[in-house]
Amino acid sequence: MFALVDCNNFYASCERVFNPNLQGKPVAILSNNDGCVIARSDEVKALGLPMGAPAFKYQSFFKTHNVQVFSSNYPLYGDMSSRVMRILGQFTPDIEVYSIDEAFLRFKGFENYDFNTHGHNIRNRVLKWTGIPTCVGVAPTKALSKVANKIARKFPKHTGGVYVIDNEEKRIKALKWTPIEKVWGIGPALHKRLAQKHCKTAYDFVQLPDLWVRKTFSITEWKLKKDLEGISKIDMEQVKDKRAIATTRSFETTLTELSDIKERISTFASSCAEKMRRQNSSCHMLIVFLRSDRFKTNSEQYRASTIVNIPFPTDSSLVLSTSAVKAVASIYKKGIHYKKAGVILTGVVPTYNRQLQMFNHEDTRHKPLMRAMDRINRKYNAPKLKLANQDLTRMWKMRQEHLSPQYTTNLEDIITVQCQKKPIKH
């Protein structure tokens, strides 16, 4: 059996854990630089606030409906996610962290378990130990556990936040209830193609012939179909190294000077290099891009990108920063108000398992230097050591006008509890 454990309104729930006054009130979380709405509580969904709503267009809406607005507090959300996942790992060692707020659990050797009770035990422990509410869907396959989770989330009063699909009657009823566009893995393009075959529900999808699905679509859609039939074909995924690593940011204000843009690009390249070293990888190609502010319609619009091939695989911040700075200088156009830039590392290979070259190779002094930098920066949990072409006094700062404290990751933001001693009655 598989279980999908999904945190309810995760970002909003994290804010509510440390600010109980938010319980029952509409809460909205904004994206980087307070751009648009990326998370909503049930209360704000009921008011009709759409996902992705631009914050500047909905200021009056927020005031009218007394919506509590917060900037994305990723240190807090990441730490709370880690706590939830560690708790889930206590119920089975076979766990796949699917996203920041959901995970698949596989139960082998649990044939004699009451999965409804087990699901409630999972839900209650996560709620008690972290304050985060969850829903649990249990079924014989991963795709069906997704469906079960949606039912648990949709009907909390009837299910208590846990739903188990453990027989054919429940499976068929659940598939008939699930619209085809809500099925895990069915995107807009596939939905349109299935609509031509009059597929309106997940049940309609599983009625299609296997051979037709494989010929018309691919093995992926066939596996999804079999999973929905209760035949497990989608296995638990193993953690894999990233094939591309990127750091892309919108600037706090528009930049016009090449020197300022070079400093940002150097910082982005160094950040990518540090991420790559963390997974013991190197790269031999990078992409740099620049974009103007598309909201300034009166200004000239411009976007450009370039690819740089490095003659040898490297994870050195020095090499990657130098290459990225040269690249951005080649696509820079004077007079443009730039709002966003980024560095993408690709052509990723394992650092200690790669093709060596006789004439082109990295300076041997870079490896110990990078290890020393990473060790010191990890010790202080901040980039204390930087390259000389970076601004030594500047930390990357997004516009976060509604940021809550980092309750669990910053000593200065830890909640102070006031205890009052009660008089002892004799």
Image (cartoon, rainbow, N blue to C red):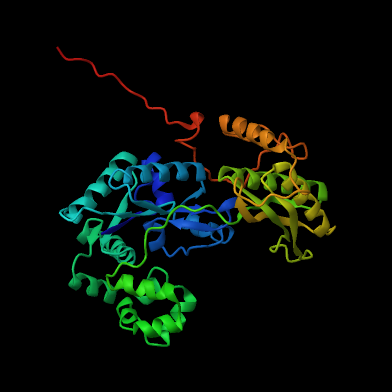
Residue extending furthest toward the right: 334
380 or 369, which is in the foreground? 369
Q: Residue at x 69, y 43 (%)?
A: 316
Residue extending furthest toward the top: 426
Q: Is residue 32 left or right of residue 38?
A: right
Where in the figure is residue 69, as x and y percent of width and height? 49, 50
Q: How many marks?
A: 0
Q: Is residue 379 left or right of residue 286?
A: left
Where in the figure is residue 124, as x and y percent of width and height? 25, 46
Residue 342 in view in this figure: no
Image quadrant containing the C terminus: top left
Vertical side of 53 occupied by 364: above or below? above
Q: Residue at x 53, y 52 (%)?
A: 241
Vertical side of 164 occupied by 212: above or below? below
Q: Residue at x 25, y 19 (%)?
A: 422
Vertical side of 38 occupied by 182: above or below? below
Residue 339 in view in this figure: yes
Where in the figure is residue 360, as x and y percent of width and height? 77, 49
Vertical side of 419 occupied by 171: above or below? below
Image quadrant containing the N terminus: bottom left
Q: Residue at x 57, y 33 (%)?
A: 378
Residue 112 appears in which quarter of the rendering? bottom left
Residue extending furthest toward the front: 358
Q: Is residue 10 left or right of residue 271?
A: left
Where in the figure is residue 110, as x and y percent of width and height? 20, 53
Q: Is residue 200 left or right of residue 321?
A: left
